Amino acid sequence: MTIKIVAVIFIGLSSGLMVGSGFVALITVLGLIPRLTQLSKTMIMIHYYEWAVVFGALAGVIASLRDPVLGIPSFILIPLGLTGGVFVGMLAAGLTEVLNVFPILAKRINLDEQIVILIMGIVLGKIFGSIFQWLYFVHR
């Protein structure tokens, strides 16, 4: 029994370290945060962005290990959810900007001239997917 507990602890810690290292490498090597601050013209606030990512990752880990019940009214949760979604969207936009994903994808599917249609399709797909996930999985 003790060997199983030690094995689970070891596997859990090593898996967490592996995923965390990959996350940090992704953000660091690609220069996601500096590029995000350049796009939003808020270079002076780069430390706040970095700490927001750190605290967001920690909060995500804690929330995934426990099932927190927050006694917060829904009218306060709506702006919190919106700002969280905006921040995740900004990180995704910074990642696609760094990797030049949209021009490569537009060239592959022959939409060089209509890149706005491609971006709007991705945005609307993300919005409808999030709404579907919220309505179907969260409210059940």
Image: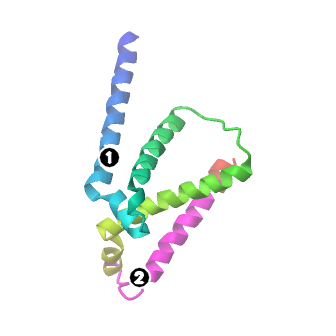
Which of the two residues, 37 or 13, is positioned nearer the viewer here?
37
Which residue shows up at 50% across the image and 40% down it? 59
The kind of secondary structure element at disc 2 is helix
For the residues labelled 1 and 2, the Cα–Cα distance comes to: 31 Å
The kind of secondary structure element at disc 1 is helix
- Residue 112 tag number: none
- What amino acid is at disc 2? Ile
- What amino acid is at disc 1? Val
Q: Residue furthest left?
A: 29
Q: Main secondary structure of the magenta part?
A: helix
Which of the two residues, 130 or 140, is positioned nearer the viewer here?
130
Q: Residues within 10 Å of mark 1 (few under 14, many from 20)?
A: few
Q: From the top left corner, tell me how far across and down residue 35 is, in percent.
A: 34, 64
Which residue shows up at 30% across the image and 66% down it? 99
Q: Say whether residue 113 is magenta.
A: yes
Which of the two residues, 136 or 115, is positioned nearer the viewer here?
115
Q: Which residues are magenta?
A: 108-134
Q: Answer whether labels 1 and 2 touch (C-beta < 8 Å).
A: no
Tag 2 residue:
115
Q: Is residue 15 above or below residue 43?
A: above
Which residue shows up at 42% across the image and 61% down it? 92
Q: Is residue 99 above or below residue 8?
A: below
Q: From the top left corner, tell me how far across and down residue 135 is, in percent.
A: 67, 55
Q: Is residue 77 found left or right of 98 in the rendered image?
A: right
Image quadrant where one finds the N terminus: top left
Tag 1 residue:
24
Which residue shows up at 36% across the image and 57% down it? 33
Q: Residue furthest front?
A: 44
- Which quadrant would residue 21 be assigned to in this image? top left
Q: From the top left corner, tell me how far across and down residue 20 is, in percent.
A: 35, 41
